[in-house]
Amino acid sequence: MIMEGYDNFLFQKVMDTADLIVPDGVPLVWALKIFQDRSASRVYGPTLTLYVCEEATSKGIPIGLYGGTPESLIEFQRFLYHNYPGIKIVCLIAPPFRPLTQEEDDAHTQEILNSGARILFVGIGCPKQEWWMYNHRNRLPLVMLGVGAAFDFHSGRVKQAPALLQKTGLEWLFRLFMEPKRLWKRYIKHNPRFLILFAVQLFQKKILNRKGVLK
């Protein structure tokens, strides 16, 4: 997502409008520790999803799910009912994997409104989900949380990386191995450039530190 914003100024503005932005990737946590905040820690999207579901259950807040496939949504719904008895899931929408017509989008938006959901988990992938939430911010008076592949992870349709790979910042490699056709272009395009730009920024920081500009 950082690199998408670097490449597209308009998408960067979309991200800047969010009320909450958290570092999901371990390399971003490392960068934050070096440049800004040594106390930074990872906020893993699938884990954040469960924390929010737990709180929503305890407070009786109805939630909705937007994204994935009909099968993955049903399996994720079953997972949530099992782990959070009493959770209120009032809306399940699996949009097609293509641009929606205006009529389809209007119908989905009205369905979400009619459901009474107060929190909507949006799992249609980056940067699509960020654009979708931005474009619907004035049409849906509720909390929208972009959660990427959380539906597939928790439904068991996609395997999560082992804890060791996550801690060492190699989750991307595991995901590439699991879904090469879908992810290879993203990682080939973004990962090397991220490392190069990170190294440049780190070098500039050291130069400024030597000159006494930064402390």
Image (cartoon, helix red, strand yellow):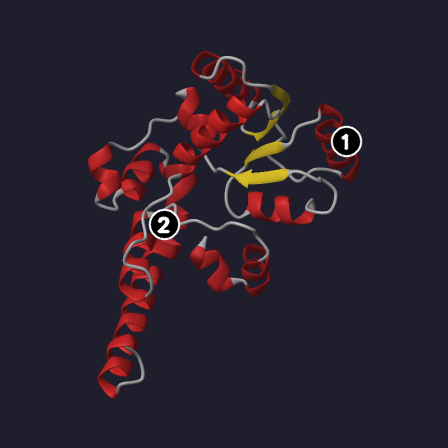
Q: Which numbered disc flags the more N-terminal residue, 1 or 2?
A: 1
The spot of residue 80 in percent (x, y) is: 48, 18
Tell me which corner region of the image, top left, top right, bottom left or bottom right, holds residue 24. top left
Q: Where is residue 48 in the image (x, y as percent from the top left)?
A: 43, 35
Determine the CA span between mark 1 and mark 2: 36 Å
Foreground label between 1 and 2: 1
Residue at 23 percent of width and 42 percent of height: 167
* Residue under label 2: 187
Q: Quadrant of residue 210?
A: bottom left
Q: In this view, does 60 lie to the left or right of 184?
A: right
Q: What residue type is labelled 1?
A: Gln
Q: Position of residue 187 (x, y in %)?
A: 36, 49
Determine the residue located farthest toward the bottom in the rendered image: 211
Where's the C terminus, which quadrant?
bottom left
Query: Where residue 61 appears, x then y in whole percent?
Result: 60, 26
Which numbered marker is on residue 110? 1
Q: As drawn, is 155 to the left or to the right of 167? A: right
The residue depicted at 62 percent of the width and 24 percent of the height is 62
